[in-house]
Amino acid sequence: IENMPIFKEEATIRNGAFKDESIKELTLKSKSGDNLWMGVSIKLFKRNMIIAVIFLIEGILVLFGAAGLIVFLISNYFVIGPLETIKEAFDKLQKNNYDINLGQVSGIEMREVFKSFNQMVEELKLSQEKLSKSNWSQVKKLEDKIKELEGEIHEAEKARNNLENKLKEYM
């Protein structure tokens, strides 16, 4: 009413009915003495409020759905994807394949995990090579010892044969 200078500051609101429908009646008095009457349907108002609430709920659900999708995509890119890469690398390690380098990844935490994993694989590879060389040198030593023992056995058999021959001659 303040922004409408032709009206007095008198307004009344009361419950009413129009064609068997509940309405709110608004009456404004003009400075000239005329009345401005307006009726607002409660039924229509309630219906429009229900529609507005439904649209609001739908909007909120769409926002939550979009936010959930964004969270999923971000977690997939920064967490799930890198974890799958690490799992595949562990599968290769189980098969004694040490030629693994996870490369680079986004995110500080995963970058550190990948870096540590790559270092671990490199250390495993070096340890495996040392172990293999160590085992090979032990195998070589054993082979040399076997040849030496075979030679001693051969000499012992010769000596035994010589003794048997001398015994036969002596008897």
Image (cartoon, rainbow, N blue to C red):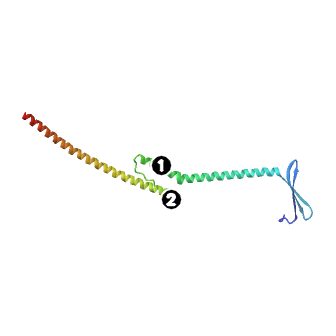
Q: Position of residue 149 (x, y in %)?
A: 21, 44
- The residue lying toward the viewer, choosing from 171 and 66, is 171
Q: Residue at x 58, y 51 (%)?
A: 72
Residue drawn at the location 30% of the way across and 48% of the way down: 136
| Image location (x, y in percent) of residue 129 | 34, 51
Q: Which residue is mark 1?
A: 87
Q: Quadrant of residue 24?
A: bottom right
Few, some or many C-alpha atoms within 10 Å of disc 2 (few <14, some 14-19, many ≥20)? Answer: few
Question: Mark 1: which secondary structure?
Answer: helix
The answer to whether residue 44 is left or right of residue 86 is right
Q: CA distance from mark 2 to mark 1?
A: 19 Å
> Which residue does the image show at 28% across and 48% down from the upper left?
138
Q: Position of residue 61 (x, y in %)?
A: 67, 51
Q: Dot 1: within a 10 Å radius of its alpha carbon, few (fewer than 14), some, or many (20 or more) residues?
A: few
Instruction: Check disc 2 and report the residue beneath it.
Output: 108
Label 2 or label 1, whichever comes before in sequence order: 1
